[in-house]
Image (cartoon, rainbow, N blue to C red):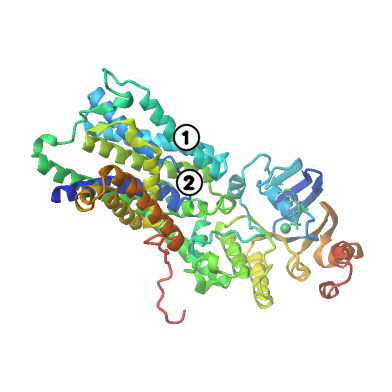
Amino acid sequence: MTTDLLLSVKGVHKHFGGLKALDGVSLEVSAGSIYGLIGPNGSGKTTLFNVITGFIARDLGEIVFQGQSLKGLSPDRIARLGLCRTFQANICPGRMTVMENMLLAPQRQLGESILNTLRRFRQVRRQEKENLQRARYLLELVKLGDKADSYAAHLSGGQKKLLSLGQALMVEPRLILLDEPVAGVNPKLIEEILEVIRRLRAEGQNFLIVEHNMRVIREVCDLVSVLDAGQVIAQGPAVETLKRDDVLRAYLAPRGGVSEEARAAT
Amino acid sequence: MTEFLIYLITIAGIWGILSLSLNFQYGLTGLLNLGHVGFFMLGAYTSTILVVLAGLPIIVGMVAAVAAAALLGMLMALPTANLQQDYWAISTLAAAEIIRIIFLNTPLGGPYVGEAFGVSGIPRPLRELFTSEGYNLFYMWLVLTCLVLCYLLVVWLSHMPFGRTLKAIREGDDIPLALGKRVSSFRIRAMMVGGALGGFAGALFAHYNAYIAPEYFLPLETFIVWAMVILGGAGNFLGSLVGTFIIQAIYNSTRFLAGWVDIEASVLGPLRMIFISVLIIAVIIYMPKGLLPERRRRYDHRPTAKR
Ligand SMILES: Nc1ncnc2c1ncn2[C@@H]1O[C@H](COP(=O)(O)OP(=O)(O)O)[C@@H](O)[C@H]1O
Ligand SMILES: [Mg+2]
């Protein structure tokens, strides 16, 4: 079991002034599974992603990825270790085309060195060709095949989410953290994306997914953690955990009633 | 008339290199560099000092000018890691002024050399091979050749993965960081490339004009280069060249206008700056992308037929 432990988060705290955004969060993500993280708005999910990926410093706690502590590492360094995240907000560079966005992502690009672009041009060009092929394949996969030359700014909200997913896949990381990957995506497309995620899992890709949509979590995740006000209130196999009363109450109480979504989830 | 045209093309060529380099930093990378004249000045002074005062060959002076300006670019880029963009912009303005004030207060060798007097008698490369008219024509072609090489360099780099990452950084650090890019290293290198070209332009200017003084390198020069980039189109290198030519033509038009219209030269000077300012305001309002907007990089060359 310990051998395929990918990511371990232990007792992580993060306070913003008096607000306890993360109040002792622990979870473990193992290889070969899709891990879900749910919780009401403001429960600290995005903050946890920011802390894991080095975008904000934690106050307390330990985060270990593939046996290496991430303490004090910069976000780009963490990404290069094979831990890639997407953002909840759509912030892909809008003045670049979809294809340019995709080609940005691959690691160890020779052509990022000025000297190499002059001295090792043939290798640079070969690498670029390979990346282009892979980008075309992945764009088809995330249903953006006909958008390659569109500016990212011109995509719909849902399409931008799909572009982020495609970008993360171009990185070929060991673990992908997706922050609400299907928010704003139309229901028919969601179905197709879930299919893609399941397929990628079968090919060995690991995910940690934050999602609001309970159905999505139930359908693709093996394990879940439920976050509420910065604390993990439940953890375990997805289907059973999402049926628990305390989970539903935490999830629904702020809205004061049982919604359609909750009925569907139970 | 031809003499004037040769002068105009030479000057526009030198400033063209400046605006290409600012466009590389601002148009491509989004760096609000308000101290671009600093590179130009450092390049001009470095080559001048090495050639006039140390007696080194002109080519050595020019190479050193490029290296010194690249180093300055690196130094100027260091605070980007800690400062917000607008504060960093002010730091670049300050850096260029500090360099100018240092040259303004430093005597260089003998009496009446350096400080506000500047340096005169800067040698011109291969001068002995030409008559004086022939030489101006030669220098014009020299500058144009350099301009073409600089143009090819920036276009080349902007099409490489290096330039693509710069383009992403232009819209914020988060995505490049999440994709594992060492953002500050990219910004430093963008400032170094732009700085090196700016220093090169400075050396070309010093050895053309044969005289330099601190008053040539006021912050106004930076804003004229900005006007060229904005008019031509940020992110389009051909646009920079078009913008440069138009602004230089306006800037140098007073020589003509003085003969044609009944306005005193002392009024015409400020008038042309007003004209350039109004032009830039109009461009920002009505053509925010400039005369030649940035071009879309296309990868999908498949015919319109079905995939
Ligand atoms: N940079 C920040 N500064 C101050 N408060 C923040 C910051 N980021 C998040 N918060 C607060 O932390 C809490 C958790 O936010 P977040 O992690 O975005 O929740 P979630 O993603 O689960 O909706 C919220 O109350 C939010 O307002
Ligand atoms: Mg969130």
Does any portion of residue B54 appear in the rendered image? no
Give whichever of B89, A248 is nearer the camera.
Answer: B89
Query: How many numbered circles are shown?
Result: 2
Left or right: residue A117 versus residue A218 is left
| Residue assigned mark 2 | B32
Would you say A92 lies left or right of B33 here?
right
- From this viewpoint, is residue A255 visible? yes
Give A154 or A199, whichever is nearer the viewer. Answer: A154
Amino acid type of the residue that numbered disc 2 sits on in the rendered structure: Leu
Q: Which amino acid lies under the numbered mark 1 shown in the image of this protein? A: Ala
Q: Earlier in the sequence, mark 1 or mark 2?
A: 2
Crowding near pointer 1: few (<14 within 10 Å), some, many (20+)? some
The residue tagged 1 is B94
The percent position of residue A21, horizontal first and vertical second, equals: 79, 49
Which of labels 1 and 2 is toward the front? 1
Q: Chain of mark 2?
A: B
In the picture, the quarter occupied by the C terminus of chain A is: bottom right
Are the two marked residues, 1 and 2, in contact with CB atoms closer than 8 angstroms?
Answer: no
Q: Residue at x 23, y 36 (%)?
A: B209
- Most distant residue in the right direction: A245
